[in-house]
Amino acid sequence: MKHLIFLIIRIYWHLKPKNRPPRCLFRHNCSNYIYDQTKQNGWIAGLQAFWFRVNNCRPGYFIFKDPETGKTLMQLRTGKIISEEEIAERLLIK
């Protein structure tokens, strides 16, 4: 199963147009994140990572500054809050 996930991701990487601009909300893009999770923690973790990203990497997020720390945070559409280190650089509040 693990090898099937790797194969699907590699096919996606091969077929994805190279000049397509990034759309992922996360700094570590979705396909790389799922690949790494599968490689490090097994195919179940890879599927869980896929499901997490499918449910969260889409419109419905809210970016804001934490008044205490001054860091940029993002509330995902599911309510989970992620830190500045996880947010795609193109979305960070300057």
Image (cartoon, rainbow, N blue to C red):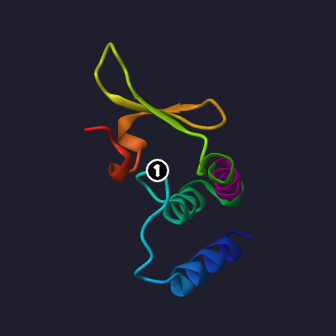
Quadrant for the N terminus, please: bottom right
Q: Which type of secondary structure does the marked residue at label 1 adopt? A: loop
Q: Report the residue at 41% width, 28% height from top.
A: 64
Extreme residue toward the left, this view: 94
Above or below residue 32? Residue 8 is below
The part of the image, by quadrant, that contains residue 92 is top left
Residue at 42% of width from left, 43% of height from top? 86
Image coords of residue 88 (percent x, y):
39, 50
Is 1 left or right of 89, judged from the image as shown?
Answer: right
Count of all numbered marks drawn on residues in the image: 1
Is residue 67 found inside the magenta-colored segment of the image?
A: no
* The C terminus sits in image quarter: top left
Label 1 belongs to which residue? 26
Membership of 47 in magenta stretch: yes
Using residue 34 as the reference point, say whether residue 17 is left or right of it. Answer: left
Q: Is residue 32 left or right of residue 68?
A: right
Above or below for 35 versus 3: above
* Residue 59 on image: x %, y %: 59, 47
Residue 18 at x, y percent in the picture: 42, 82
Which secondary structure is most common in the magenta stretch?
helix
Q: Which amino acid does label 1 sit on?
A: Phe
Q: Which of 36 and 42 is in front in this view?
A: 36
Q: In the image shown, does 22 or 2 lie closer to the viewer?
A: 22
Give the residues in magenta.
45-52
Q: Which residue is drawn at 49% across and 57% down?
A: 24
**Residue 25 place in picture, x, y as percent:** 48, 51
